[in-house]
Image (cartoon, rainbow, N blue to C red):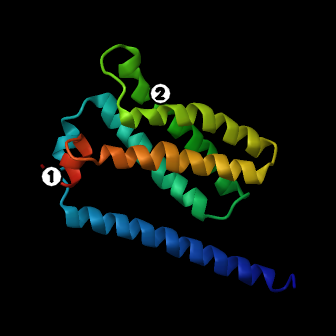
Amino acid sequence: MSALQPNATLRGDIRRVALAGGLVALAVASLLLLKPRFYLLAEMPFMLQVHLALILFGMMLGGVLMIWRKGRTFHRVGGWIFVVVVAAGSIISAIPFLMGRSPLGWAHAGLIGPALWLPLGVIFAKRRDVARHRWMMGILYFGAMLIPGAIALLPGRVLWRVFIGG
């Protein structure tokens, strides 16, 4: 059975790479078809540009980490990078509110998630409680990144104007 293991592992890795590559290709193709107006991003405040860059990178890295093989060096290092990126993106999005310059919107409800789920996810990973770590990071990814990301694409918001129009 051990003689078959390397081939099975290689096939699994190839499938993961193909899936990740397919998702990236789909994202790039959809961006090109939508004809985004990136000049609108250049007009945004600098802190919002940094927030957007961090969160988009975190979304891509988080997706790859969910697809890729777990427990290896790539997952551990990528996981720490993911934690830092999400924490930084969350803190940056809270700065205008904390300084009294803007109210919290619906998308900022995602600030609560990283404050709770990031530390718990790290604690569960350190304890090697894989099931709880997977659950916390899944909740973080979907609840604090994808749902606020979808809210950011609603009509009238900046990302709607960049990617859809209007």
- Who's the residue at 79% across and 80% down the image? 5
Which residue, as the protein is rendered here, is positioned at the far right? 1
Q: Looking at numbered disc 1 in the image, what kind of residue is underneath it? A: Gly
First in residue order: circle 1 vs circle 2? 2
- Pointers 1 and 2 in contact (CB under 8 A)? no
In percent of width and height, residue 91 lies at: 47, 27
Q: Looking at numbered disc 2 in the image, what kind of residue is underneath it? A: Ile
In percent of width and height, residue 120 lies at: 69, 37
- Is residue 89 shown to the viewer in this render? no
Taking the image as shown, residue 157 lies to the left or right of residue 26, namely left
Q: Secondary structure at mark 2?
A: helix
- What label does residue 49 carry, if any? none
- Who's the residue at 37% across and 14% down the image? 99
- Who's the residue at 37% across and 35% down the image? 106
- Is residue 126 shown to the viewer in this render? yes
Mark 2 closeness class: few <14, some 14–19, many ≥20 residues within 10 Å: some
Compared to 20, does 54 lie above or below? above
Taking the image as shown, residue 94 lies to the left or right of residue 103, namely right
Instruction: Give the CA distance from mark 1 to mark 2.
Output: 29 Å
- What label does residue 165 carry, if any? 1
Mark 2 = which residue? 91
Mark 1 closeness class: few <14, some 14–19, many ≥20 residues within 10 Å: some
Quarter placement of the N terminus: bottom right
Which residue, as the protein is rendered here, is positioned at the far front? 106
Q: Secondary structure at mark 1?
A: loop
In percent of width and height, residue 4 lies at: 80, 86
